[in-house]
Image (tube, rainbow, N blue to C red):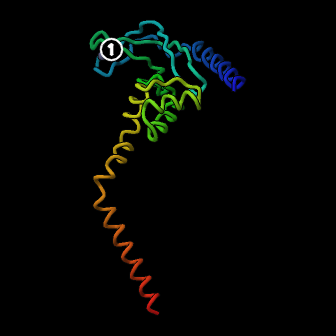
Amino acid sequence: MAARRQALRLAARALEQRLNADTSDHAGPPLPCSCGGRADYHGRHSKTMESVLGPLHLERAYYHCAHCQSGFCPRDQALRWESFSLTPGVLRMTASAAALVSFEESSELLHELAGVEVSAKQVERAAEALGARDRGRRTATSRNDGRSGSHHVSGNGWHRSAHAHSGSR
Ligand SMILES: [Zn+2]
């Protein structure tokens, strides 16, 4: 396990270096902001992303819009890393765990099984965005028992009458 961790750390450092050496996400001219304004380049910002390899310390071009006072990193959007600080692989694991156990337990599970650090708060945010419908469906089953209940009864009735029929023979 320790050797595996070490190998993952090395892979993480290599990936980190490759991504940080690639500064093509800084195009130069201002980029259009979602508010309709223009976002100007404001240097490279670093952020720690939780990946399946462990934490990645990444520097990305940051654009800030003076009109709506918000900023974004084009690379985060391109790689779908926005808002969670989780790479897609970790995001999928997080959503899977959160569908089965609580946010706190998911956080512990991800740490123990995958060695990734995802806080209960991050699990909650990711689950709300990705698995909200699944959780809603599960909690709604108790209220939705009318339809499934009648189906169960009619199935049972058919089975019983068929059994009675074969018994009379
Ligand atoms: Zn804006």
Vertical placement of residue 108 versus 25, above or below: below
State the residue at coordinates (47%, 93%): 169
**Callout 1 amino acid:** Ser
Residue 42 picture location, percent across and down = 41, 7
What residue does disc 1 label?
A: 70
State the residue at coordinates (45%, 36%): 98
Residue that protrudes farthest toward the top in the picture: 43
Mark 1 residue element: strand
Vertical placement of residue 149 versus 10, above or below: below
Vertical placement of residue 71 versus 155, above or below: above
State the residue at coordinates (45%, 6%): 43
- 101 sits to left or right of 19: left
State the residue at coordinates (54%, 13%): 23
Residue 85 picture location, percent across and down = 46, 22
**Ligand 1 placement by image quarter:** top left
Indicate yes or no: mark 1 CB to ligand 1 under 8 Å.
yes
Q: Observer-nearest residue: 76 or 25?
A: 76
Vertical placement of residue 63 versus 50, above or below: above
- Where, by quadrant of the figure, is residue 68 drawn? top left
Q: Observer-nearest residue: 161 or 115?
A: 161
